[in-house]
Amino acid sequence: MKYIAGILAAAAVIFGAVAVAQAEDIISSAGANTYDGGPFHIAAGETPNYVNPAGSLGYHNVVSEDDGPDGEKLFESEAIPANSSSPVVGAQYLSPGTYHFVCTIHPGMEDDLIVDPGTPVARPAVKLSVPSQKLKKARKSGKIKVDVKGVADSTGVDLTLSKGKAVIGTAADLAVDKGKTRTVSVALTSAGAKAIKKGKKVTVTVAGTLPFGKPVSAKGTLR
């Protein structure tokens, strides 16, 4: 659930560029800890809303039982009180099939989301590389450049730069459009600056994580 706040903002960016059809709402029951009217159907590429109606017994949510390529849940809503709604983010990336979900607050509250034929939204994906750059310049600036290429529209990309097992710098919450390359100057920590001070060459690894997308990594050598 750690991504949910950032993903709601990211969804606004993604959905602004992609026409999203109106999916069937996922609705919970008034007066009972159950979902009402399931299984629920959407076409591939649609994003359903979870609706917790007036008269609900309390907070509920919709959370996939399965994990996605980022190690988090395939799809999820916020936990919301009665008489409110929340988008079920991540559902827009699902291929046709049946996906089980639960309310994480109330054991036994569960149902299915059936994704009918359609075209899923491209799952966020990036490619990383460490471009050619002078080690002397990196030492002086305290920064190492990393190229982030958008394989698909991606937001919330986090980078971790390492030398061996030691983390020497990070960058967070990056966005890149499909087909575009963004060059990021990753600031080194004080320990990271010390780690690259010696030697005629330094090999670094950059690892990237992104909500609903597969983690990626790349290596590069500065001379």
Image (tube, helix red, strand yellow):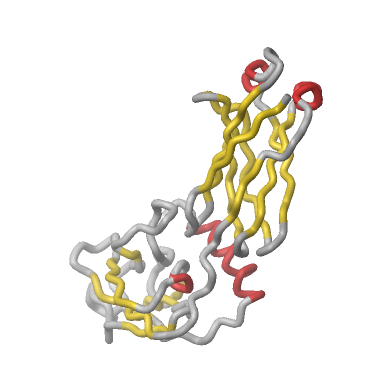
Residue 112 makes an appearance in the image: yes
Q: Is residue 203 above or below residue 89?
A: above
Q: Is residue 111 above or below residue 43?
A: above
- How many tags in the picture? 0
Report whether 216 appears left or right of 130: left
Residue 86 makes an appearance in the image: no
Report whether 208 appears left or right of 13: left
Residue 220 spot, x, y in % from top left = 64, 34
187 or 147, nearer to the observer: 147
Most extreme residue toward the top is 198
Q: Residue at x 25, y 78 (%)?
A: 31
Residue 9 spot, x, y in % from top left = 60, 63
23 or 152, nearer to the observer: 152
Find residue 169 and report its image quarter: top right
Q: Residue at x 58, y 46 (%)?
A: 158
Q: Is residue 198 above or below residue 149?
A: above
Q: Residue at x 55, y 45 (%)?
A: 208
Q: Quadrant of the N terminus?
A: bottom left
Q: Residue at x 62, y 77 (%)?
A: 18
Find residue 198 and report its image quarter: top right
Residue 122 spot, x, y in % from top left = 54, 69
Q: Quadrant of the C terminus?
A: top right
Residue 130 spot, x, y in % from top left = 67, 39
134 or 96, nearer to the observer: 134
Find residue 44 and report its image quarter: bottom left
